Amino acid sequence: MKRSASIDSILKPLRGTPNQAYLSNAVQVADILEWILSQVGISEVWQTSFSISEEFLRRLFFICKGNKVSRINLVLDHKATNKTLKLWAFITQVIERTYLADNHSKILLVKSEAGDCVSVVNSQNLTRGNRAESAFISTDPEIFAGLYAQVNDLITNHSVPLNDLFRQRLAAD
């Protein structure tokens, strides 16, 4: 996030605002994740994106190192496989479960150990950029349940675990 911008000037606390949206170039997906975790505590995270960058993975590494998440589940797109495979060693250090699917969605789901559920549908890939990006954030349990069911279906029925794909690539080489 730009140092001149405060996330509190863009978003209101989750407790008092069950639904909110923004359009800004000052907020990154990792900022949103940290902001949510600071309010709900240790959580399991599901993220979907077209692609991921090393810079974003570093942010996730430090979020995990700070014991803020219990597990991260990640879905990336098959079309970004070459870039993803180059980051495979780092991804496996940070994220337990990574899957590849025909995916262009950008969804962040957070479920805390206390049962709080937060859904974020956003426009940004898991990369760093200074473009205007948008997101809708909700604490509505029904929205979370619907998105969770769809992300889980994508993982269970329409994806390949990254570890399996990497092993196949190594065997082919």
Image (spheres, grey):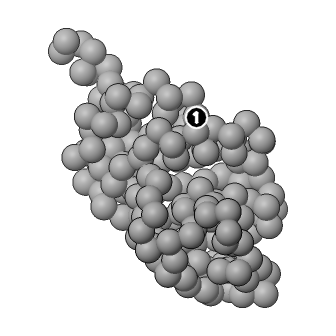
Left or right of 61? Residue 84 is: left
Q: Quadrant of residue 82?
A: top left
Quadrant of the image for the C terminus?
top left
Q: Position of residue 52 (x, y in %)?
A: 41, 46
Does residue 111 appear in the picture of this structure? no
Q: Residue at x 68, y 86 (%)?
A: 18
Dot 1 falls on a residue whose secondary structure is helix
Q: Residue at x 18, y 15 (%)?
A: 172
Left or right of 57? Residue 160 is: left
Q: Position of residue 78 (x, y in %)?
A: 25, 45
Identify the residue position indicated by label 1 in the image.
Answer: 94
Residue ranking furthest to the front: 4
Q: Residue at x 61, y 63 (%)?
A: 2
Left or right of 69? Residue 76 is: left
Q: Quadrant of residue 17?
A: bottom right
Q: Position of residue 155 (x, y in %)?
A: 40, 50
Left or right of 158? Residue 98 is: right
From the viewer's perspective, is residue 109 above or below residue 25?
above
From the viewer's perspective, is residue 172 above or below residue 94?
above
Q: Residue at x 39, y 42 (%)?
A: 99
Quadrant of the image for the N terminus?
bottom right
Q: Quadrant of residue 66?
A: top right
Q: Position of residue 141 (x, y in %)?
A: 64, 78
State the residue in front, 27 or 170: 27
* Callout 1 amino acid: Val
From the viewer's perspective, is residue 10 above or below residue 72?
below
